[in-house]
Image (cartoon, rainbow, N blue to C red):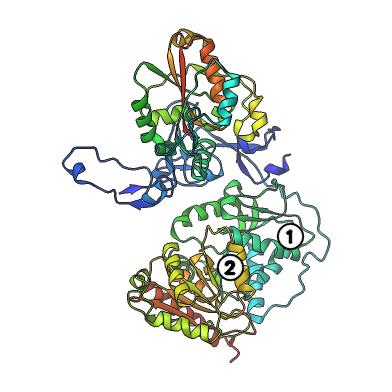
């Protein structure tokens, strides 16, 4: 029995010297052909543009899958090896869950719903606003699953989310073996009962998890939807449970909830019981032209000046890197004594800069959408310049607004969308935030 | 609309007046404007006449002086198209090691231009062979793949007989002591005799691979061996 292969479906070059092939190892071809379409067996892509023809030793007409090439090349002539998951885990001493905190009534309710989904199987969406305290609501369900010898995976499309989750989960379940799987991991794979993985890594699993929890499912909208769904459905056991966590579920998913095709737990309030900050809209003319011509006038620059004067610290979200650098030049000219910097996805000093902002060493921080989620600052305001730009989707704007007022000692904060014509996404974002606040009032979850 | 092979961005091709009146073919560029700044062509830089690296001065570089001592009879000269910068490194990783064949198109045009401008039909173009192990994983010879994209005829007269340990996973010293990994295919021995041969490889790092291949060809009667690499 190869424990390392259990519940996994791998290419021959990924077997790493596992040569013991017995009748329990099942094989499939790299591509699956049905009457209607050809699709990659590992990632499920059936798009013509994802199949690239290339010369191959196997002869003429071989192709490979472009969609999951990053994980190693799946060719038409490849073989995938799979071994059934048998849940061979050691007993865990009580208490399985080491976490000693308490849940708010709203969290407790969701926690029980999650537990029942985990016990019964099926799917559930946990729609919780930024700052509701999602992770803690999972503990009870995970603990029960682990006791029942179930294999549990927490996945997210974003590696930073995985890396942030890992120590918290390991701490709460310190007696359980856990591994974190992502693209640039150095550790070699081990068979563990608890797995934390990027959703990409789920492609290497097949019918492995009794419980699969996907955090921040909407982190990459649109294009990843299909492959993420495929990977999730493949990685979970057929009778297992699948739980989605999101602060901003897609319209498609909300529709499923509305039509009662998907069970949902909705958490409209933050753990501290204050409402979500509602974004204000401010027209600021052709902001792009203004910063490109270094004409530093208008409401945006006025507000920045006022905030600096009032010693408020703030984030400025900008649609792209080029504009961010141009804006940085403007602000440098205008406020040479202000301490600030800018941060973007490929920034090698991203972590350090975020830390500087968190430690209140900066007056403000310019950023692209990269800081829209996953980061918490104590007491900040949030400005978005060019909120009508297409990079700012409804989900992105809701997440961005969710950066303000996170801390219980500073539960309020200003959120301003500066624009040159309101977009539909801006209006929908504000509507979503107002709806959540209303729901929280109705349920009596707001203190004031 | 062109799609950038590297970053996937879509962009309108620039159409010049000459294109419209049919003086030249409208070429679809493999890279978008932004990505095309990531490559550094060696053409307009001062380079070493021995190995083609960026080099000031009329003499050959210290590496080439050492090679000269090693191979006093061999009048080597390497042409390189691009500087081996971080983009080239990533490109080679994606094309060769990840096996993304379509990326070969990125260098096709300059490769074709370089070969046709500098080498006439009297030269026999030969790609550096890859080990059996690599070809099993990758499915293709990466250098032959590039020549196909560049529409250059080539003959695979050499074959790899080594163990297939990757040069790229060794340090300089380990590379230098690598034993001769090539031989001329038996059935192609007479194709080499009295021939001028142009050897093609993807990247020139220490030169070890190319010198091995050249040594092999010269010993079988080639009159002249020149080399060309995508990157240096």
> Of the residues under marks 1 and 2, which one precedes in the sequence?
1
Q: Residue at point 76% right, 61% down? A: A147
Quadrant of the rendering where the C terminus of chain A is positioned = bottom right
From the viewer's perspective, is A287 left or right of A163?
Answer: left
Numbered badge on residue A146: 1
* Letter of the chain that mark 1 sits on in the rendering: A
Work out which residue is located at the far right of the displayed protein and give it. Answer: A93
Please identify the quarter of the rendering in which residue A46 is found: top left
Residue A358 higher or lower than B163, as above or below:
below
Looking at the picture, how far across and down is residue B54, in whole percent? Answer: 49, 37
The alpha-carbon separation of the residues under discs 1 and 2 comes to 27 Å
Viewer-proximal residue, B127 or A143?
B127
Count of labels in the image = 2
Numbered badge on residue B153: none
Viewer-proximal residue, A358 or A375?
A358
Looking at the picture, how far across and down is residue B48, in whole percent? Answer: 49, 32
Is label 1 in a helix, a strand or a loop? helix
Work out which residue is located at the far left of the displayed protein and give it. Answer: B21
Work out which residue is located at the far bottom of the displayed protein and give it. Answer: A448
Residue A52 in sight here:
no
Residue position marked by numbered label 2 in the rendering: A374
Is label 2 in a helix, a strand or a loop? loop
Q: Residue at point 33% right, 77% down? A: A285
Residue A363 higher or lower than A83, as above or below:
below
Q: Nearer the viewer, mark 1 or mark 2?
A: 2
Viewer-proximal residue, B108 or B40?
B40
Please identify the quarter of the rendering in which residue A323 is found: bottom left
Residue A232 higher or lower than B128, as above or below:
below
Looking at the picture, how far across and down is residue B205, in whole percent? Answer: 56, 33
Both marks 1 and 2 on one chain: yes
């Amino acid at each position: 029995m190869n424990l390392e292969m259990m519940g996994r479906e791998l290419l021959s070059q990924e077997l790493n010297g596992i040569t013991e092939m017995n009748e329990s190892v099942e094989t499939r071809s790299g591509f699956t052909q049905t009457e209607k379409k050809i699709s990659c067996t590992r990632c499920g892509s059936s798009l013509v543009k994802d199949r690239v023809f290339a010369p191959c030793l196997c002869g003429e007409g071989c192709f490979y899958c472009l969609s999951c090439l990053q994980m190693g090349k799946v060719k038409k002539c490849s073989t995938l090896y799979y071994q059934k998951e048998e849940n061979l885990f050691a007993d865990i001493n009580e208490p399985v869950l080491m976490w000693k905190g308490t849940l708010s009534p709203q969290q407790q309710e969701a926690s029980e719903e999650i537990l029942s989904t985990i016990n019964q199987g099926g799917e559930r969406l946990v729609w919780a606003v930024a700052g509701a305290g999602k992770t803690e609501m999972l503990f009870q369900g995970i603990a029960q699953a682990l006791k029942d010898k179930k294999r549990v995976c927490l996945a997210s499309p974003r590696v930073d989310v995985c890396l942030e989750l890992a120590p918290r989960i390991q701490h709460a379940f310190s007696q359980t073996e856990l591994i974190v799987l992502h693209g640039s991991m150095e550790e070699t794979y081990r068979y563990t009962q608890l797995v934390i993985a990027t959703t990409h890594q789920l492609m290497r699993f097949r019918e492995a998890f009794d419980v699969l929890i996907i955090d921040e499912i909407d982190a990459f909208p649109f294009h990843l939807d299909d492959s993420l769904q495929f990977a999730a459905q493949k990685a979970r056991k057929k009778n297992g449970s699948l739980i989605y966590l999101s602060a901003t579920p897609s319209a498609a998913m909300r529709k499923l909830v509305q039509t009662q095709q998907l069970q949902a737990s909705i958490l409209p309030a933050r753990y501290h019981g204050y409402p979500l900050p509602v974004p204000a809209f401010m027209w600021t003319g052709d902001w792009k032209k203004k910063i490109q011509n270094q004409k530093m006038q208008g409401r945006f620059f006025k507000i920045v000046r006022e905030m600096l004067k009032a010693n408020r610290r703030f984030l400025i979200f900008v649609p792209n890197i080029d504009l961010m650098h141009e804006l940085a030049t403007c602000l440098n000219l205008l406020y040479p004594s202000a301490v600030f910097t800018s941060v973007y996805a490929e920034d090698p000093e991203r972590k350090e800069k975020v830390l500087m902002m968190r430690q209140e060493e900066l007056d403000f921080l310019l950023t692209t959408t990269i800081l829209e989620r996953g980061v918490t600052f104590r007491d900040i305001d949030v400005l978005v310049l060019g909120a009508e730009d297409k990079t700012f989707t409804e989900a992105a704007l809701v997440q961005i607004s969710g950066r303000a007022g996170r801390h219980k000692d500073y539960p309020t904060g200003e959120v301003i969308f500066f624009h040159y014509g309101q977009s539909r996404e801006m209006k929908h974002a504000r509507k979503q935030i107002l709806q959540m606040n209303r729901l929280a009032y109705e349920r009596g979850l707001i203190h004031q | 609309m062109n799609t950038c092979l590297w970053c996937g961005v879509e962009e309108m091709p620039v159409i010049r007046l000459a294109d419209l009146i049919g003086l030249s073919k409208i070429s679809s560029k493999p890279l978008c404007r932004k990505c095309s700044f990531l490559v550094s062509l060696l053409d307009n830089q001062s380079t070493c006449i021995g190995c083609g690296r960026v080099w000031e001065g009329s003499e050959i570089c210290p590496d080439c002086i050492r090679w000269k001592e090693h191979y006093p009879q061999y009048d080597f000269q390497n042409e390189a198209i691009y500087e081996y910068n971080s983009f080239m490194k990533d490109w080679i990783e994606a094309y060769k090691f990840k096996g993304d064949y379509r990326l070969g198109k990125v260098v096709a045009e300059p490769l074709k231009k370089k070969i046709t401008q500098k080498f006439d039909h009297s030269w026999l173009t030969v790609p550096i062979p890859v080990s059996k192990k690599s070809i099993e994983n990758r499915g293709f010879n990466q250098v032959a793949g590039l020549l196909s994209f560049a529409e250059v005829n080539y003959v695979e007269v050499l074959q790899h007989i080594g163990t297939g340990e990757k040069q790229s996973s060794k340090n300089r010293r380990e590379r230098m002591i690598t034993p001769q990994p090539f031989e001329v295919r038996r059935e192609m021995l007479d194709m080499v005799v009295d021939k001028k041969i142009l050897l093609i490889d993807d990247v020139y790092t220490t030169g070890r691979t190319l010198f091995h291949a050249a040594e092999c060809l010269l010993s079988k009667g080639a009159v002249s061996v020149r080399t060309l690499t995508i990157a240096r």
